[in-house]
Amino acid sequence: MEGNKSLKQMYRRIIGDHFPDEIEIRFGDQALLYRKKRWKIMDPATGELTERGLRYGENPDQEAALYELVEGELVLGDTRFVGPGMGLVSSVTEMDMIQAGKHPGKINLTDIDSALNIIRYLTRRPAAVIIKHNNPCGVAYGKDLADAYYKANMADRIAAFGGCAVFNRPMDKDVAEMVSQNYLEVVVAPEFEEGAVDILTRKKDLRIIKIKGISRIGEYADKRFVDFKSLMDGGIILQQSFLNRIKRAEDLKPASAVYKGEEYRIEREPTDKECEDMLFGWADEQGITSNSVIYVKDGVTVGIGTGEQDRVGCAEIAIFKAYIKYTDAICFKEHGIPYNELKLMVKKGEKDKGLLDEIEQKAQEDKGGLRGACMVSDGFFPFRDSVDVAAEQGISAIIQPGGSVRDHEVIEACNEYNITMVFTGQRAFRH
């Protein structure tokens, strides 16, 4: 028992750091000045007001620090990078941490950042992104914010447990009430309407953060930052951050390829609804670890396969997850309990096995919610196998970069199944 208590305390401990208060990074004759962030927050372990930076890094024994860009304008070639005064996560103050819960750690902040990376392209309608381990559990548009959150949460209630929810509109009491029914680590919105915070603070460990910049998040859609990758030998790789160029239906290119002098073209043009879902899905890809394949339908993620080595594996994993999440959603809507809990009750003889059979049959008939969905791939298809496995589930449209030597085979496969396909002309890898 004492050992278990010690392990729990490990995750609440603030280990401090030895990183300097300021860092200057020079790019030739241009310099950027970064200042370390500290916050005066009540330490739950001691009950005292403590001024510290990040609680710890990716693990409780890793020191970490957050820095905000405070001086310097960087221009390299024809690219002007994000400058001072445009901070989002890095500019959060004590006032913005409406409720701090446990002192923030690195993963909390990078999860928020990953959500913002998606939501900067989802500004037209109310949207919610639920993130866990730098990948979305569910992303959804809605007729209002409550509808968006409900759809994002039901897309994967299982993974959303302990996640980070980010909204692109001010949160009202209805949304706050819905959020309070779940266990989340972090909730972020550009503003909180009267009464919303009172509801959210019922959960004492919930971090409630206001980032006003979300109200103008669309301004970041065309801005680059310097992306640093550190190597284990102390070296670093710099790259420009990725920018999504596919934002309108006009940016989608009907799939075509030439092979041995013969031209191959997709036969069916996408419908307006398919275009909407493809654009929505391509925006989602901006916050997903590659290799990835996802499925979206009606402005909601249906299945997400991330970080796999082979593309068909991503396609298959996303299908597998879609069925699991859809089955759980049916069970929760009809019986008010998770599917795995119902399975356990059936095993103990507390519930009739017929309930499980009905749910599983419904999921199979609906193909895990995948029928009519759009398939989104962050890289090209090296073979037609991904199309074949997705076609079995009734998907109707595909968006992918194109550029494979076997594009003609993929196009042929789509035409066989009457699936429409567009090329983006850009890859969306995120490592």
Image: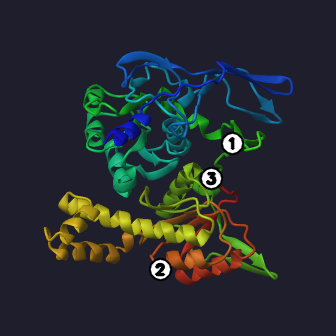
Quadrant in which residue 36 is drawn: top right
Of the image marks 2 and 3, the number of the one nearer the N terminus: 3
* Left or right of 254 on screen, residue 162: left
Residue pointed to by mark 1: 241
**Mark 3 belongs to which amino acid?**
Ile
Check disc 3 and report the residue beneath it.
246
The percent position of residue 230, horizontal first and vertical second, equals: 72, 41
Q: How many marks?
A: 3
- Where residue 33 sits: x, y (%)? 71, 21
Quadrant placement of the N terminus:
top left
Local packing at callout 2 (Cα closer than 10 Å; few below 14, some 14-19, many 20+) is few
Mark 1: which amino acid?
A: Ser
* Residue at mark 2: 392
Observer-nearest of 252 and 131: 131
Quarter of the rendering containing residue 34: top right
- Who's the residue at 48% across and 51% down the image? 136
